[in-house]
Amino acid sequence: MELITLRELKQQAGPVGLQAVCHAQLEQCRQKMTKTGNPFYEVGFADAEESLVLRVWNNTPMFAFCSELKERQFYEVSGEFSLGNDGRSVDGKNWTVRALNAEESAQVLAGSGELREKQEADFAFITETTAAISDPRLRALCRSFLARFGERMQRTGAARDYHHARRGGLVEHVAQMMRTAVQVCEAYPMLNRDLLVSGVLFHDVGKLWENAYSADGFTMPFTEISELIGHIPLGMEIVNKLWRDLTEDEVQAKEWSLLEPPSERVRLHLLHLIVSHHGELEFGSPVVPKTPEAQALHYIDNLDAKMEMFDRGYQVAGELAKNVQERVRPLPGRLVRPLEQFDWGEAAATSEPEAAPESEGEASSPELVRDEEERPEPF
């Protein structure tokens, strides 16, 4: 049987059973009761991109060994999988598990080769782009953050649900936002590129304590600090702490005091980007965007989140009709497959051959014959 990811399993499972093998971490194995009093297990697995819950009924051969499974252990799950009765969930039939060795577990934790390559390239882009910041204060702040918290950032999700909700998702989100921000600054020269790029890096920095995955797995624990404070105030605290640490160097502090715009305004404007990036008070921003960079950051953040929702939705949402798929929340409606881009090469390959030219003396259709003088001038 072919080794596939959990996302591929969800995509390929249908009414007819799919024979497959997956490597994943066991997130939970909980015994529950049906309404009629029959016991069953909910067994939750996760890998670097997806999660999957299998229900094990007490009349199946798998029920007996569920009590022996250990949470946070990495397993190979193999057997027959098919869509559940609701048309969305995946049921396992006659599946078995075996514990993975250390090397296999490390590969699951790192994700697929494609995902690893993407996240490594994204983190390199973040590092290179922030290193090119002209303002020495913002450049030093970004460098200090990446040096101290880069490893933690690379195992943090951009959200608990909805978008980039996976290990390393924050790196993907920030990198794509940073690419967009650079292009937006080209289109709108009024924007302070140094400030906007820094704002992209720091806007969700509080999520390193709100959405960080455990160092050895795919569990995103809940924490008291994130519940009581949230990622926006936490982000402000982190930036202020890094800023204070940098200005404790008396020589550097003196150099910064001579720069324009004043260092205190630089810090204040960066903090404004963090506190206003949700855009509206009802969406959690303490204040609304009041500068061009703050408004741009809000839209860039929202755009990238929505594009990720569409991308993942097309991969996992059930099909309702040709080109129509189920709704993926919080997007406002059912998904419709996007229009393919026009390809001149493909069009030329599939077009009908041109008609052979008429021989001399044959009459041409009068509707197709025009004198040069009758042809309209091009615009």
Image (cartoon, grey):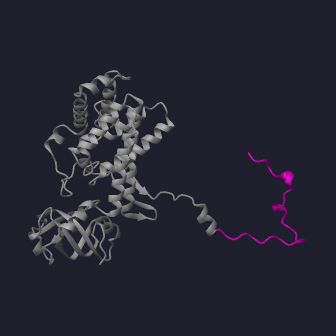
Q: Nearer the viewer, residue 38 or 129?
A: 129
Magenta portion: prevailing SS class? loop
Residue at (35%, 49%) from the top-left corner? 124
Decide whether residue 361 is among the magenta residues.
Answer: yes
Percent across and percent down for residue 178 are 39, 43
Percent across and percent down for residue 87 are 31, 67
Q: Nearer the viewer, residue 48 or 265?
A: 265
Q: Is residue 8 depicted above or below 208 in this figure?
A: below
Q: Quadrant of residue 325?
A: bottom left
Percent across and percent down for residue 337 are 45, 59
Asked if residue 326 can be seen in this view, the reply is no
Q: Nearer the viewer, residue 169 or 134?
A: 134
Percent across and percent down for residue 378 are 76, 48
Asked if residue 128 can be seen in this view, the reply is yes
How many numbered discs?
0
Q: Is residue 4 depicted above or below 160 in this figure?
A: below
Highlighted range, magenta: 351-379
Q: Quadrant of the C terminus?
A: top right
Q: Quadrant of residue 115?
A: bottom left
Q: Given the current orientation, which residue lies at the most extreme right position?
A: 361
Decide whether residue 159 is among the magenta residues.
Answer: no
Q: Nearer the viewer, residue 329 or 221?
A: 221
Q: Given the current orientation, which residue lies at the most extreme front position?
A: 251
Asked if residue 92 lies left or right of residue 192, the reply is left
Q: Is residue 18 depicted above or below 87 in this figure?
A: below
Residue at (21%, 57%) from the top-left corner? 218
